Amino acid sequence: MGGPLRNESSFWDFRNMAHNCKLAEIRSSGNWFSWAGWRDKIWIQCRLDRSFGNDEWFQLFPRAHMEYLDMWASDHRPILITFASEQSVNAKGRFCFDKRWLSKPGIVDVVKRGWCGGQQDIEISLAERIGRCRSELSRWKRSSNTNSEIRMVKLKETLEKEVSKMHPDPNLLKKGLRKSVGNGQNTWVWIEKWIPDDYPRPPTSLQRNRDVMLRVSDLLDRNTGHWDEDRVRHLFIREDADYILSLRVSTDLQDSYVWSFSKNGLYNSQSGYKLLEALPEHQEFPITSLPPIEKKLWSRLWKVQTMPKIRHFMWKALAGALAVSDRLQSRGIHIDLTCKMCGKETETICHVLFHCHVAKQSWGLSNIPAPEMVQKLICV
Protein backbone atom coordinates (compact mmCIF):
# COMPACT_ATOMS: atom_id res chain seq x y z
CA MET A 1 0.00 0.00 0.00
CA GLY A 2 1.46 3.34 -1.02
CA GLY A 3 4.16 2.03 -3.36
CA PRO A 4 4.42 1.87 -7.15
CA LEU A 5 2.37 -0.68 -9.05
CA ARG A 6 4.13 -3.94 -9.90
CA ASN A 7 3.65 -6.00 -13.03
CA GLU A 8 1.39 -8.98 -12.44
CA SER A 9 3.94 -11.26 -14.11
CA SER A 10 6.47 -10.57 -11.33
CA PHE A 11 4.40 -12.80 -9.01
CA TRP A 12 4.13 -15.78 -11.37
CA ASP A 13 7.33 -17.55 -10.27
CA PHE A 14 6.32 -17.54 -6.61
CA ARG A 15 2.77 -18.67 -7.38
CA ASN A 16 4.02 -21.50 -9.58
CA MET A 17 6.44 -22.61 -6.87
CA ALA A 18 3.67 -22.65 -4.23
CA HIS A 19 1.37 -24.55 -6.61
CA ASN A 20 3.98 -27.13 -7.60
CA CYS A 21 4.98 -27.75 -3.97
CA LYS A 22 1.31 -27.90 -2.94
CA LEU A 23 1.79 -25.17 -0.36
CA ALA A 24 -1.16 -23.55 1.38
CA GLU A 25 -1.05 -20.45 3.53
CA ILE A 26 -1.49 -20.85 7.30
CA ARG A 27 -4.58 -19.03 8.53
CA SER A 28 -3.65 -15.81 10.31
CA SER A 29 -5.01 -12.94 12.37
CA GLY A 30 -3.90 -9.39 13.13
CA ASN A 31 -2.65 -6.58 10.92
CA TRP A 32 -1.06 -8.39 7.97
CA PHE A 33 0.86 -5.31 6.77
CA SER A 34 4.01 -6.76 8.32
CA TRP A 35 6.49 -4.18 7.01
CA ALA A 36 6.40 -0.39 6.85
CA GLY A 37 9.00 2.13 5.78
CA TRP A 38 10.03 4.97 3.49
CA ARG A 39 11.05 4.30 -0.10
CA ASP A 40 11.83 7.26 -2.40
CA LYS A 41 9.97 9.66 -0.08
CA ILE A 42 6.86 7.43 -0.11
CA TRP A 43 5.46 5.78 3.04
CA ILE A 44 4.88 2.13 2.10
CA GLN A 45 3.19 -0.72 3.95
CA CYS A 46 3.22 -4.25 2.58
CA ARG A 47 2.46 -7.84 3.50
CA LEU A 48 6.04 -9.04 3.40
CA ASP A 49 5.89 -11.97 5.85
CA ARG A 50 3.66 -15.02 5.29
CA SER A 51 3.73 -18.67 6.39
CA PHE A 52 2.95 -21.77 4.32
CA GLY A 53 2.71 -25.53 4.82
CA ASN A 54 2.05 -28.61 2.69
CA ASP A 55 -0.53 -31.38 3.21
CA GLU A 56 1.75 -33.50 5.41
CA TRP A 57 2.55 -30.50 7.59
CA PHE A 58 -1.13 -29.65 8.12
CA GLN A 59 -1.81 -33.30 9.05
CA LEU A 60 0.75 -32.98 11.84
CA PHE A 61 -0.43 -29.51 12.93
CA PRO A 62 -4.10 -29.15 11.91
CA ARG A 63 -4.69 -26.33 14.42
CA ALA A 64 -1.73 -24.21 13.36
CA HIS A 65 -2.38 -20.48 13.44
CA MET A 66 -0.22 -17.43 12.71
CA GLU A 67 -0.64 -14.09 14.49
CA TYR A 68 0.81 -10.75 13.39
CA LEU A 69 1.99 -9.03 16.58
CA ASP A 70 2.41 -5.32 17.31
CA MET A 71 5.29 -3.49 15.64
CA TRP A 72 7.80 -2.39 18.30
CA ALA A 73 11.27 -0.89 17.71
CA SER A 74 11.45 -2.34 14.20
CA ASP A 75 10.00 -1.84 10.73
CA HIS A 76 8.83 -5.48 10.79
CA ARG A 77 5.96 -7.00 12.73
CA PRO A 78 6.99 -10.16 14.59
CA ILE A 79 4.86 -13.19 13.75
CA LEU A 80 3.90 -15.90 16.22
CA ILE A 81 2.91 -19.35 14.98
CA THR A 82 0.91 -21.53 17.37
CA PHE A 83 1.10 -25.20 16.38
CA ALA A 84 -1.68 -26.54 18.63
CA SER A 85 -4.04 -25.53 21.40
CA GLU A 86 -4.78 -28.79 23.16
CA GLN A 87 -5.43 -27.24 26.56
CA SER A 88 -9.07 -27.38 27.60
CA VAL A 89 -10.84 -24.05 27.91
CA ASN A 90 -12.07 -24.95 31.40
CA ALA A 91 -8.73 -26.23 32.65
CA LYS A 92 -7.17 -24.18 35.45
CA GLY A 93 -3.75 -22.72 34.83
CA ARG A 94 -0.85 -22.96 37.23
CA PHE A 95 -1.24 -20.67 40.23
CA CYS A 96 1.75 -18.47 41.06
CA PHE A 97 2.16 -16.11 43.99
CA ASP A 98 3.44 -12.73 42.85
CA LYS A 99 5.84 -11.32 45.43
CA ARG A 100 4.80 -7.80 44.39
CA TRP A 101 1.50 -8.45 46.16
CA LEU A 102 3.34 -8.21 49.50
CA SER A 103 3.46 -4.43 49.11
CA LYS A 104 -0.30 -4.19 48.55
CA PRO A 105 -2.47 -3.13 51.50
CA GLY A 106 -4.73 -5.86 52.89
CA ILE A 107 -2.87 -8.77 51.30
CA VAL A 108 -1.93 -10.24 54.71
CA ASP A 109 -5.58 -10.34 55.78
CA VAL A 110 -6.52 -12.03 52.50
CA VAL A 111 -3.95 -14.80 53.04
CA LYS A 112 -5.00 -15.26 56.70
CA ARG A 113 -8.64 -15.51 55.69
CA GLY A 114 -7.85 -18.15 53.11
CA TRP A 115 -5.49 -20.09 55.38
CA CYS A 116 -7.77 -20.20 58.40
CA GLY A 117 -11.04 -20.27 56.49
CA GLY A 118 -12.89 -18.72 59.45
CA GLN A 119 -12.73 -22.04 61.28
CA GLN A 120 -9.62 -21.85 63.44
CA ASP A 121 -10.76 -24.66 65.78
CA ILE A 122 -11.27 -27.24 63.04
CA GLU A 123 -8.36 -29.20 61.63
CA ILE A 124 -7.92 -28.40 57.94
CA SER A 125 -5.55 -30.26 55.62
CA LEU A 126 -2.59 -28.46 54.07
CA ALA A 127 -3.88 -28.98 50.53
CA GLU A 128 -7.26 -27.51 51.47
CA ARG A 129 -5.62 -24.48 53.10
CA ILE A 130 -3.55 -23.82 49.97
CA GLY A 131 -6.64 -24.21 47.81
CA ARG A 132 -8.59 -21.72 49.93
CA CYS A 133 -5.68 -19.25 49.80
CA ARG A 134 -5.72 -19.53 46.03
CA SER A 135 -9.45 -18.84 45.88
CA GLU A 136 -9.21 -15.84 48.22
CA LEU A 137 -6.29 -14.38 46.28
CA SER A 138 -8.15 -14.86 43.00
CA ARG A 139 -11.19 -13.01 44.35
CA TRP A 140 -8.93 -10.25 45.68
CA LYS A 141 -7.23 -9.88 42.29
CA ARG A 142 -10.54 -9.52 40.46
CA SER A 143 -11.81 -6.87 42.88
CA SER A 144 -8.52 -4.95 43.18
CA ASN A 145 -7.78 -4.49 39.46
CA THR A 146 -4.26 -5.89 39.83
CA ASN A 147 -4.22 -7.88 36.60
CA SER A 148 -0.87 -6.89 35.11
CA GLU A 149 -1.66 -8.46 31.75
CA ILE A 150 -4.76 -6.31 31.26
CA ARG A 151 -2.88 -3.20 32.36
CA MET A 152 -0.05 -3.98 29.95
CA VAL A 153 -2.51 -4.36 27.07
CA LYS A 154 -4.11 -1.00 27.89
CA LEU A 155 -0.73 0.71 28.24
CA LYS A 156 0.44 -0.75 24.92
CA GLU A 157 -2.70 0.54 23.21
CA THR A 158 -2.13 4.00 24.69
CA LEU A 159 1.53 4.00 23.70
CA GLU A 160 0.76 2.82 20.16
CA LYS A 161 -1.78 5.61 19.72
CA GLU A 162 0.74 8.23 20.85
CA VAL A 163 3.57 6.85 18.72
CA SER A 164 1.27 6.58 15.70
CA LYS A 165 0.74 10.35 15.89
CA MET A 166 4.38 10.75 14.89
CA HIS A 167 3.80 8.88 11.59
CA PRO A 168 2.11 10.30 8.51
CA ASP A 169 -1.44 11.47 9.14
CA PRO A 170 -3.78 10.23 6.37
CA ASN A 171 -6.09 13.21 6.97
CA LEU A 172 -3.16 15.60 6.51
CA LEU A 173 -2.19 13.88 3.27
CA LYS A 174 -5.75 14.15 1.97
CA LYS A 175 -5.73 17.91 2.57
CA GLY A 176 -2.65 18.29 0.37
CA LEU A 177 -3.70 16.01 -2.49
CA ARG A 178 -4.98 17.55 -5.71
CA LYS A 179 -6.36 15.94 -8.86
CA SER A 180 -4.10 16.55 -11.85
CA VAL A 181 -6.14 16.65 -15.06
CA GLY A 182 -5.00 14.51 -17.99
CA ASN A 183 -7.95 13.67 -20.22
CA GLY A 184 -10.48 14.71 -17.56
CA GLN A 185 -12.53 11.51 -17.79
CA ASN A 186 -12.01 10.48 -14.15
CA THR A 187 -12.39 13.88 -12.45
CA TRP A 188 -15.74 15.20 -11.22
CA VAL A 189 -15.92 18.97 -11.73
CA TRP A 190 -17.85 19.94 -8.59
CA ILE A 191 -16.82 17.15 -6.22
CA GLU A 192 -13.07 16.65 -6.53
CA LYS A 193 -10.29 19.07 -5.61
CA TRP A 194 -8.45 20.04 -8.79
CA ILE A 195 -8.02 23.79 -8.36
CA PRO A 196 -4.82 24.86 -6.47
CA ASP A 197 -5.28 27.55 -3.85
CA ASP A 198 -4.22 27.92 -0.23
CA TYR A 199 -5.60 24.36 -0.11
CA PRO A 200 -6.78 22.27 -3.09
CA ARG A 201 -10.50 22.76 -3.79
CA PRO A 202 -13.21 22.32 -6.43
CA PRO A 203 -13.82 25.34 -8.69
CA THR A 204 -16.24 28.08 -7.67
CA SER A 205 -19.45 28.19 -9.71
CA LEU A 206 -21.20 31.21 -11.22
CA GLN A 207 -24.44 29.24 -11.50
CA ARG A 208 -26.89 28.40 -8.72
CA ASN A 209 -27.83 25.04 -10.24
CA ARG A 210 -25.00 22.61 -10.95
CA ASP A 211 -24.80 19.24 -12.65
CA VAL A 212 -23.05 17.10 -10.03
CA MET A 213 -22.37 14.40 -12.63
CA LEU A 214 -20.34 16.79 -14.80
CA ARG A 215 -16.82 15.57 -15.59
CA VAL A 216 -13.85 17.71 -16.57
CA SER A 217 -13.80 15.95 -19.95
CA ASP A 218 -17.25 17.46 -20.61
CA LEU A 219 -15.60 20.90 -20.64
CA LEU A 220 -13.53 20.01 -23.70
CA ASP A 221 -14.44 20.68 -27.32
CA ARG A 222 -15.07 17.26 -28.88
CA ASN A 223 -13.68 18.34 -32.24
CA THR A 224 -10.42 19.99 -31.14
CA GLY A 225 -9.80 18.29 -27.78
CA HIS A 226 -9.10 21.72 -26.23
CA TRP A 227 -11.08 23.67 -23.64
CA ASP A 228 -14.49 25.00 -24.61
CA GLU A 229 -13.69 28.57 -23.50
CA ASP A 230 -17.26 29.89 -23.73
CA ARG A 231 -18.59 27.12 -21.51
CA VAL A 232 -15.72 27.43 -19.00
CA ARG A 233 -16.25 31.17 -18.58
CA HIS A 234 -20.00 30.63 -18.33
CA LEU A 235 -19.65 28.13 -15.45
CA PHE A 236 -16.78 29.44 -13.29
CA ILE A 237 -15.63 32.67 -11.67
CA ARG A 238 -12.97 34.58 -13.62
CA GLU A 239 -9.96 33.49 -11.50
CA ASP A 240 -10.84 29.80 -11.77
CA ALA A 241 -11.72 30.08 -15.46
CA ASP A 242 -8.33 31.67 -16.23
CA TYR A 243 -6.54 28.88 -14.40
CA ILE A 244 -8.56 26.11 -16.10
CA LEU A 245 -7.92 27.55 -19.55
CA SER A 246 -4.19 27.64 -18.81
CA LEU A 247 -4.12 23.88 -18.15
CA ARG A 248 -2.78 21.61 -20.84
CA VAL A 249 -4.97 18.58 -21.40
CA SER A 250 -4.06 15.39 -23.21
CA THR A 251 -6.34 12.59 -24.35
CA ASP A 252 -3.43 10.15 -23.86
CA LEU A 253 -2.95 10.86 -20.14
CA GLN A 254 -5.08 9.57 -17.29
CA ASP A 255 -6.07 11.84 -14.41
CA SER A 256 -3.92 11.33 -11.33
CA TYR A 257 -3.31 12.64 -7.82
CA VAL A 258 -0.40 15.00 -7.05
CA TRP A 259 0.87 16.72 -3.92
CA SER A 260 -0.22 20.33 -4.26
CA PHE A 261 2.52 21.87 -2.09
CA SER A 262 5.64 20.91 -4.04
CA LYS A 263 6.84 21.89 -7.50
CA ASN A 264 7.21 18.32 -8.78
CA GLY A 265 3.90 17.12 -7.33
CA LEU A 266 5.57 14.64 -4.98
CA TYR A 267 5.23 14.68 -1.21
CA ASN A 268 8.24 15.65 0.90
CA SER A 269 8.65 16.23 4.63
CA GLN A 270 9.38 19.94 4.27
CA SER A 271 6.15 20.72 2.42
CA GLY A 272 4.16 18.48 4.76
CA TYR A 273 5.54 20.33 7.78
CA LYS A 274 4.66 23.71 6.26
CA LEU A 275 1.10 22.55 5.55
CA LEU A 276 0.80 21.27 9.10
CA GLU A 277 1.82 24.65 10.49
CA ALA A 278 -0.78 26.42 8.32
CA LEU A 279 -3.77 24.25 9.26
CA PRO A 280 -5.86 25.89 12.00
CA GLU A 281 -7.02 22.56 13.43
CA HIS A 282 -3.41 21.48 13.98
CA GLN A 283 -2.25 24.50 15.94
CA GLU A 284 -1.97 22.34 19.05
CA PHE A 285 0.37 19.91 17.29
CA PRO A 286 3.38 19.20 19.53
CA ILE A 287 5.86 20.84 17.16
CA THR A 288 4.42 24.29 17.79
CA SER A 289 5.09 24.03 21.52
CA LEU A 290 8.78 23.16 21.09
CA PRO A 291 11.58 25.62 21.91
CA PRO A 292 12.63 27.76 18.91
CA ILE A 293 15.35 26.31 16.70
CA GLU A 294 17.46 28.52 14.47
CA LYS A 295 16.04 28.83 10.96
CA LYS A 296 19.46 28.22 9.39
CA LEU A 297 19.55 24.74 10.87
CA TRP A 298 16.07 23.96 9.52
CA SER A 299 16.92 25.26 6.03
CA ARG A 300 20.15 23.26 5.90
CA LEU A 301 18.36 20.10 6.95
CA TRP A 302 16.53 19.72 3.63
CA LYS A 303 19.80 20.18 1.69
CA VAL A 304 21.70 17.38 3.43
CA GLN A 305 22.87 14.84 0.85
CA THR A 306 21.80 11.57 2.45
CA MET A 307 19.11 8.89 2.35
CA PRO A 308 15.50 10.11 2.80
CA LYS A 309 15.11 7.87 5.86
CA ILE A 310 18.07 9.56 7.60
CA ARG A 311 16.87 13.03 6.64
CA HIS A 312 13.42 12.15 8.02
CA PHE A 313 14.99 10.97 11.28
CA MET A 314 16.91 14.25 11.57
CA TRP A 315 13.68 16.17 11.05
CA LYS A 316 11.95 14.14 13.78
CA ALA A 317 14.86 14.79 16.16
CA LEU A 318 14.75 18.55 15.58
CA ALA A 319 10.96 18.59 15.81
CA GLY A 320 10.91 16.64 19.08
CA ALA A 321 8.98 13.80 17.46
CA LEU A 322 11.10 10.88 18.69
CA ALA A 323 9.52 8.48 21.20
CA VAL A 324 11.93 9.07 24.09
CA SER A 325 10.64 9.05 27.67
CA ASP A 326 10.74 12.83 28.03
CA ARG A 327 8.55 13.40 24.96
CA LEU A 328 6.14 10.58 25.81
CA GLN A 329 5.56 12.02 29.28
CA SER A 330 4.80 15.41 27.73
CA ARG A 331 1.97 13.66 25.87
CA GLY A 332 0.41 12.47 29.14
CA ILE A 333 1.96 8.99 29.31
CA HIS A 334 3.20 8.07 32.79
CA ILE A 335 6.59 6.50 32.21
CA ASP A 336 9.97 6.21 33.91
CA LEU A 337 12.12 9.09 32.64
CA THR A 338 15.44 7.38 33.32
CA CYS A 339 17.57 6.56 30.27
CA LYS A 340 17.23 2.87 29.44
CA MET A 341 20.86 2.68 28.25
CA CYS A 342 22.83 4.30 31.09
CA GLY A 343 20.19 4.31 33.85
CA LYS A 344 21.41 7.68 35.17
CA GLU A 345 20.10 10.73 33.32
CA THR A 346 16.67 11.74 32.02
CA GLU A 347 16.00 10.22 28.60
CA THR A 348 15.69 13.28 26.35
CA ILE A 349 16.41 13.45 22.63
CA CYS A 350 19.62 15.37 23.29
CA HIS A 351 20.75 12.85 25.92
CA VAL A 352 20.07 9.83 23.70
CA LEU A 353 21.86 11.33 20.69
CA PHE A 354 24.81 13.07 22.33
CA HIS A 355 25.22 12.95 26.11
CA CYS A 356 24.63 9.28 27.01
CA HIS A 357 27.90 7.35 27.30
CA VAL A 358 26.57 4.83 24.77
CA ALA A 359 25.95 7.67 22.29
CA LYS A 360 29.43 9.08 22.90
CA GLN A 361 30.95 5.67 22.22
CA SER A 362 28.95 5.40 18.99
CA TRP A 363 30.11 8.83 17.83
CA GLY A 364 33.69 7.90 18.68
CA LEU A 365 33.58 4.64 16.73
CA SER A 366 31.89 6.24 13.71
CA ASN A 367 34.64 8.87 13.19
CA ILE A 368 31.88 11.37 12.42
CA PRO A 369 32.32 14.68 14.27
CA ALA A 370 29.42 15.94 16.38
CA PRO A 371 29.89 19.74 16.48
CA GLU A 372 29.17 21.43 19.78
CA MET A 373 26.99 24.00 17.99
CA VAL A 374 24.62 21.29 16.73
CA GLN A 375 24.30 19.85 20.24
CA LYS A 376 23.52 23.27 21.69
CA LEU A 377 20.90 24.04 19.03
CA ILE A 378 19.11 20.74 19.53
CA CYS A 379 19.31 20.89 23.30
CA VAL A 380 18.08 24.48 23.69
Image: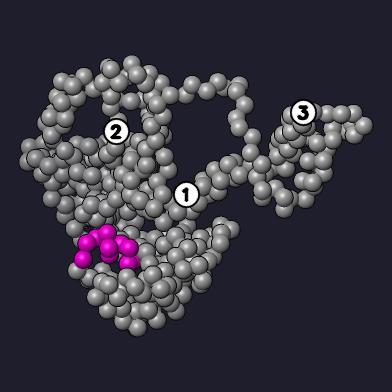
Q: Amino acid at mark 1?
A: Glu
Compare marks 2 and 1 and give the one earlier in the sequence.
Answer: 2
Q: Assign a secondary structure to mark 3.
A: helix
Front position among marks 1 and 3: 3
- Neighbor class of circle 2 (other Cα within 10 Å; few <14, some 14-19, many 20+) is some
**Residue at left 22%, top 70%?**
304
Quarter holding the C terminus? bottom left
Compare marks 1 and 3 and give the one earlier in the sequence.
Answer: 3
| Residue 213, quarter of the rendered image | top left
Name the disc covering residue 128, or none: 3
Magenta: main secondary structure: helix
Front position among marks 2 and 1: 2
- Residue placed under numbered mark 1 in the picture: 160
Q: Amino acid at mark 3?
A: Glu
Between the residue at mark 3 and the residue at mark 2, the CA separation in whole angstroms equals 49 Å
Query: How did the renderer colour the structure?
Result: one colour
Q: Assign a secondary structure to mark 1.
A: helix
Q: Is residue 261 above or below residue 18?
A: below
**Which stretch appears magenta?**
306-315
Q: Residue 161's x, y, as percent? A: 48, 49
Quarter holding the N terminus? top left
- Residue placed under numbered mark 2 in the picture: 50
* Residue 9 is one of the magenta-drawn residues: no
Q: Residue 253's x, y, as percent? A: 12, 42
**Residue at left 55%, top 20%?**
88
**Residue at left 13%, top 50%?**
248
Judging depth in this view, the residue of 163 and 345 nearest the camera is 345
Q: Residue 208's x, y, as percent? A: 37, 42
